[in-house]
Amino acid sequence: MPTTDPAARATAPALRRRGPASTEDGRRSRDRVLKAALDLIIEVGIDRVRLAEIARRAGMSSGQLMYYFTSKEHILLETLAWQEQQDTMRRAAALARVTGVWKQLERFIELYLPGTHPDPSWILWLEAWARAPHNRQVSRFLEELLNPWREDLAALVARGVAEGTFAAPGGDFDRRFIAVLDGLALQRLQHMQGTSRKHLTELAMYAARIELAPGPQSSPPADAQA
């Protein structure tokens, strides 16, 4: 039976929309809501966020808020998609400023891992992931949001292989490597020992060199203080 959960109906932001966010004024209003929601989710978590407070911070009434969104879960997923859209643009600009595929891979890793405590993007991802096991549509929605990261990684690796800097990795390298980064990111989010961003980046680069630069490998980086 199809789910009726409003969260499952959330879709990633599009350049052209139908409905209340299809006009320039509508998009500006919607973006104000998403920015207010992001700030509140970071501050108190989605479970303690009140729609009335989101509306107040966005400078509109609760009725106006519900014109754009159907529930807190809908706002959560749309806020995540909005944040990921911005992160994708920032990532493209950041990688373009780095020369050499190894340096670009290192920068990619740094951009993927949580940067600050709290990290806005990762807070949203954790809140959304908690809902995915109970809703296949939400799970597919999150898979689509992760695709730009995988595509950028795959393009980077393909470029390195084409120029002879990388060895061709086995199949599904992008999925395996993203899983490695997810595991390292969760350690950092839990404030585990030796989880400074620099040290975790070194560990990820060591894992990448095993597949992308075959041959004798140096020992993994020594433990570092968080």
Image: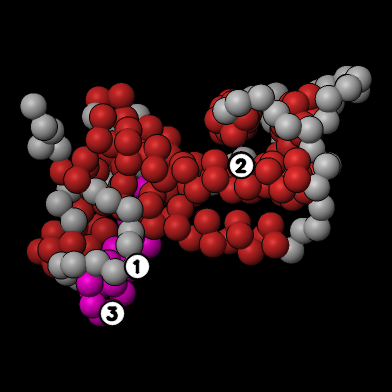
Kindly identify the residue that appears in the image at 45 percent across and 58 percent down: 85
Is residue 135 visible in the rendered structure shown here? Answer: yes
Q: Percent x, y for residue 220?
A: 83, 22
Residue appearing at x 10%, y 37% in the figure: 4
Q: Which residue is mark 1?
A: 15
Above or below 30: residue 81: above
- Circle 2 is placed at which residue position? 154
Q: Of the two numbered discs 2 and 3 on the same chain, state the one appearing first in sequence.
A: 3
The amino acid pointed to by label 3 is Glu
For the record, the magenta segment spans: 22-41
Q: Residue 112, which numbered label? A: none
The amino acid type of the residue labelled 2 equals: Ala
CB contact under 8 Å: marks 1 and 3: no
* Structural crowding at the residue carrying mark 3, measured as other residues with C-alpha within 10 Å and reported as few (<14), some (14–19) or many (≥20): few
Q: Horizontal and vertical percent for residue 100? A: 82, 52
| Numbered badge on residue 24 | 3
